[in-house]
Image (cartoon, rainbow, N blue to C red):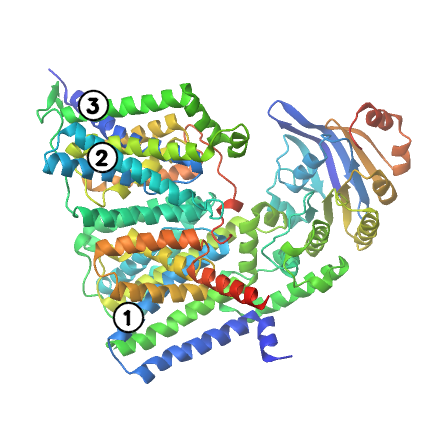
């Protein structure tokens, strides 16, 4: 005997965790790059799209073994992240933060166009890792792939937090985020740290693309909306804070899932974007309280 | 005192003279070159110049970037379309009434997000743009959903409706020229000066007894209304609107216009619009290639000339000349 | 005209100012001195509305201004110059000074965009007013240069012209003589006197003892955020508490 409310509740929790994991991977990636460069990376969703598309064509269409396809996708994304790092930091001192933001917008749409040329504009997917048979919990159901998503995301984010807190390199990255000049003075290689932030951020996105594509499918233009969800979550939690990004992602997923369950799927996105405007109004530094906003001088679009 | 010196001392007169000459030149174009398909492109330039001028006011005076100009273009277009096609108002009246809607929404958004700095404004206005796109797609009863709206009456007044490209050309270019004049006057007025000062140091400006928040919201509203008028002119020219009318890609194209023409140059925005319209017509036929070309150009321009392609080239030419003279 | 009573400012657990009270009378030049960290700039920030006081009262001609936003305080008639000159480097010197009179004119977005006649008249008035004060500050002849081209010392004159153009009753000057040589300091002293003679009250902070003592009508001494003494320069120079406070610290005074 299970009441409908309980079933709904379990269903909402499971869906929230699944969707929230995906958003968290993007949001944490956004935070990493924001910490390293002070810029919100518009092309964050392209990591997810590129890895999803690569595995879909290598494993799904060409029949490579899954590990080989996954390895190839990770290589593609790491190279892409390095390229992105190169173009955004090449003349960083000369370009305003908004200028760099525009560069990432350019990178995002160029990548969408290129992906549509390399593959096509259709949606792609590949078979789930552990089959399609849903697992039942009371009357609620969850697909095995959702468990993969939740598990892989949890491992990735926990691993990242461990890395940032416990390794020398991770500590150097945090020092860099706090004060670049001081970090340079104590001998931290700042450029390498920025590169590492992009690569780690890319790997998180790639992991997301690989585990979610069987469930949600992916297309060449699918990255941008994910990126927007990512910075919404990161901003909700407090820009630059990793636990904040995680919290923000889960909250947004909860709101979306609840809207879909009790209202209409058509308006799924509406509450999310209303939230972001409310957060900016009421809590400009987010729930957890991220880093301070940077000053106006550096942000001016027309200064050189 | 020479004429030039007199004009320089009075910016309003200088702007009027410049825009007047420009408008005369534009009005002579069909007389000299006759009618043809190119007029259609020229009309689009006149329309797209409006959101570009609007964004240029925002980025040039306030140093900020908004991704909401596509959304306000869409609100202007749908607002005027609904008021004229469904409520039967005259297109001129509907165009003006739609701007009240644009202004009210922009004032609300502006009051909230302009307290924030830098790229937060970009992200917040992007969120707003997504909401607008969703509402347009889902509010089928009013907007026609994905199919859009057809049968929007052409621009006109008292039963006289523009019906040919030449007529639209002679209606739209004077409107765009007047809007350009408005923008130029605003930029050279004390409001423009206050905004440029606010961009440099808001606390100091407010210590002079100036209410800075009002100016920031004001310029965002004006900037958005430029986009809204552009949208209404668009709707009454092509006769239909779809959710693609003011999409995020459109907003990015407007940013691209400024990247080409310069982020703080109103005349540059006009040149940028002409360039992108030509590109769209002759080089960017396929959507995928268009995205690649737009994206790569955007990156290249920002890397090499962060203030925009045109100002960058002008600076370069000036340096060359100085180098040669030395 | 300015009356400050039991003013207090705490930053977290740190008390920057405690029970400060003093008043400035119309037309006076009043100086605030004290060792570094005595709370002088904090005091200015409280009066100008850059910071909100934790407690206490500030009145300008009887009007309570404590805690108001800085633009409201500017409108009430207090202008200031900064320790590090804050000029707008993307504007010309003239435009910088024109911002001073900005608050007197109402021209809104619509009339400015339309270039209506009254906005042009306003602009003319603003220009005249700005030119007058640039002349006063001795930089009228370079009004059309860009403010970024000026050395720091001259940027201070731009600030003074801008502050005077606001037509404020009271002008707060934060270390106006910092970084100036003897001749420039003397010129500045003359200018401050001229400001005072024009009817504007001056409240200034400075470290140069000679400068302050020869210029001020009255001196307020702060030490560790508290009011140590107040009186004429002569009284202050002979005050035992002040001498002790200054000798007791190794700070430059």
Q: Residue A81's mark?
A: none
Q: Residue furthest left?
A: A133
Residue highlighted by disc 1: B41
Q: Nearer the viewer, mark 1 or mark 2?
A: 2
Give the residue number, with chain letter if any, for mark 3.
A9
Marks 1 and 2, how far apart at CA: 43 Å
Q: What residue is at 25 percent from the left and 78 percent from the top?
A: B36
Q: Residue at x 46, y 67 (%)?
A: B182
State if disc 2 and disc 1 touch (CB < 8 Å): no
Quadrant in which the N terminus of chain C is drawn: top right
- Between C70 and C136, the one lying in front of the other is C136
Across and down, in percent, residue C128 comes to 68, 65
| Labels 1, 3: one chain | no
Residue placed at 75% from the left, 57% from the top?
C137
Which residue is disc 2 drawn over? Answer: A73
Furthest-top residue in this view: A1
Distance between the Cα atoms at labels 1 and 3? 56 Å
- Position of residue A175 relative to residue C179, above or below, is above
Check the image and report above or below for B24 versus A300.
below
Which circle, 2 or 3, is nearer the viewer?
2
Q: Tag 3 or tag 2, which sits nearer the N-term? A: 3
**Circle 1 SS class:** helix
Which residue is pictured at 26% across the width and 76% down the height? B165
A107 to the left or right of C236: left
């Amino acid at each position: 005997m299970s009441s409908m409310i309980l079933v709904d509740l379990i269903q909402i929790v499971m869906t929230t965790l699944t969707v929230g994991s995906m958003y968290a991977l993007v949001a944490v990636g956004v935070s990493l790059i924001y910490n390293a460069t002070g810029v919100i990376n518009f092309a964050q969703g392209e990591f997810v799209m590129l890895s999803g598309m690569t595995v879909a064509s290598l494993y799904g269409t060409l029949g490579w073994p899954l590990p080989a396809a996954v390895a190839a996708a990770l290589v593609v994304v790491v190279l892409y992240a390095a390229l992105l790092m190169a173009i955004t930091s090449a003349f960083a001192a000369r370009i305003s933060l908004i200028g760099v933001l525009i560069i990432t917008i350019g990178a995002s749409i160029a990548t969408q166009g290129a992906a549509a040329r390399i593959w096509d504009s259709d949606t792609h997917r590949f078979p789930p890792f552990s089959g399609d048979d849903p697992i039942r919990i009371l009357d609620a159901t969850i697909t095995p792939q959702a468990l993969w998503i939740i598990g892989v995301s949890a491992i990735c984010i926990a691993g990242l937090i461990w890395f940032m807190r416990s390794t020398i390199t991770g500590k150097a990255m945090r020092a860099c985020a706090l004060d670049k000049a001081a970090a340079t003075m104590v001998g931290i290689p700042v450029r390498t740290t920025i590169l590492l932030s992009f690569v780690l951020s890319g790997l998180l996105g790639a992991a997301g693309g690989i585990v979610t594509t069987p469930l949600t499918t992916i297309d060449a233009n699918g990255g941008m909306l994910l990126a927007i969800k990512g910075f919404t979550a990161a901003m909700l939690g407090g820009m630059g804070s990793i636990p904040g990004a995680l919290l923000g992602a889960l909250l947004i997923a909860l709101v979306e899932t609840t809207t879909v369950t009790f209202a209409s799927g058509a308006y799924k996105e509406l509450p999310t974007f209303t939230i972001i405007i409310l957060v900016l109004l009421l809590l400009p530094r987010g729930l957890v309280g991220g880093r301070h906003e940077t000053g106006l001088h550096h942000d001016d679009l027309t200064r050189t | 005192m020479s004429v030039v010196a007199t004009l320089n001392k009075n910016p309003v007169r200088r702007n009027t003279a410049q825009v007047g000459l420009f408008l005369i030149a534009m009005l002579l174009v069909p007389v000299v070159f006759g009618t043809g398909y190119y007029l259609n492109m020229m009309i689009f330039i006149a329309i797209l110049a409006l959101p570009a001028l609007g964004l240029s006011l925002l980025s040039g005076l306030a140093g900020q970037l908004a991704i909401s100009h596509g959304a306000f273009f869409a609100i202007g277009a749908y607002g005027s379309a609904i008021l004229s096609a469904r409520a039967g108002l005259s297109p001129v009246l509907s165009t003006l009434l739609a701007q009240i809607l644009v202004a009210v929404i922009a004032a609300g958004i502006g009051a909230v997000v302009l307290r924030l700095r830098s790229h937060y404004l970009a992200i917040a206005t992007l969120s707003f743009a997504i909401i607008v796109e969703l509402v347009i797609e889902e509010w089928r009863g009013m907007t026609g959903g994905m199919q859009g709206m057809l049968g929007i009456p052409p621009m006109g007044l008292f039963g006289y409706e523009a019906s040919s490209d030449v007529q639209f050309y002679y209606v739209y270019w004077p409107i765009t020229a007047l809007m350009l004049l408005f923008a130029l006057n605003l930029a050279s007025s004390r409001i423009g000066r206050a905004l440029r000062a606010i961009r440099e140091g808001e606390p100091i400006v407010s210590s002079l007894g100036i209410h800075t928040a009002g100016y920031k919201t004001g310029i965002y509203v004006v900037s958005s209304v430029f986009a809204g008028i552009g949208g209404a002119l668009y709707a009454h020219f092509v006769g239909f609107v779809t959710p693609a009318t003011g999409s995020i890609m459109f907003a990015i194209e407007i940013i691209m216009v400024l990247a080409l023409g310069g982020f703080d140059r109103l005349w540059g925005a006009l040149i940028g619009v002409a360039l992108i319209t030509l590109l769209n017509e002759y080089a960017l036929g396929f959507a995928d290639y268009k995205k690649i070309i737009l994206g790569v150009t955007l990156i290249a321009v920002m890397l090499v000339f962060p203030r925009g392609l045109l100002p960058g080239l002008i600076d370069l030419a000036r340096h060359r000349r100085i180098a040669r003279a030395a | 005209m300015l009356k400050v009573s039991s003013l207090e400012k705490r930053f977290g657990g740190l008390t920057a100012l405690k029970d400060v009270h003093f008043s400035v009378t119309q037309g006076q030049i009043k100086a605030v001195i004290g060792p570094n960290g005595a709370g002088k700039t904090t005091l200015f920030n409280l009066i100008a509305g850059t910071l909100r006081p934790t407690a206490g009262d500030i009145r300008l001609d009887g009007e309570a201004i404590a805690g108001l936003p800085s633009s409201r305080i500017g409108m009430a008639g207090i202008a200031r110059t900064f320790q590090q000159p804050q000029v707008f480097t993307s504007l010309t010197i003239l435009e910088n000074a024109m911002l001073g009179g900005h608050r007197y004119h109402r021209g809104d977005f619509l009339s400015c965009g339309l270039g209506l006649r009254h906005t042009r008249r306003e602009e003319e008035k603003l220009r005249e007013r700005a030119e007058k004060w640039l002349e006063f500050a001795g930089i009228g002849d370079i009004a059309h240069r860009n403010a970024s081209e000026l050395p720091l010392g001259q940027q201070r004159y731009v600030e003074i012209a801008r502050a005077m153009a606001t037509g404020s009753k009271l002008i707060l000057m934060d270390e106006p003589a910092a970084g100036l040589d003897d001749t420039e300091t003397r010129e500045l002293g003359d200018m401050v006197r001229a400001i005072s003679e024009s009817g504007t009250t001056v409240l200034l902070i400075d470290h140069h003892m000679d400068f302050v003592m020869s210029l001020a009508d009255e001196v307020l001494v702060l030490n560790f955020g508290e009011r140590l003494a107040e009186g004429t320069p002569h009284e202050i120079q002979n005050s035992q508490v002040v001498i002790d406070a200054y000798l007791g610290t190794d700070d430059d005074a």
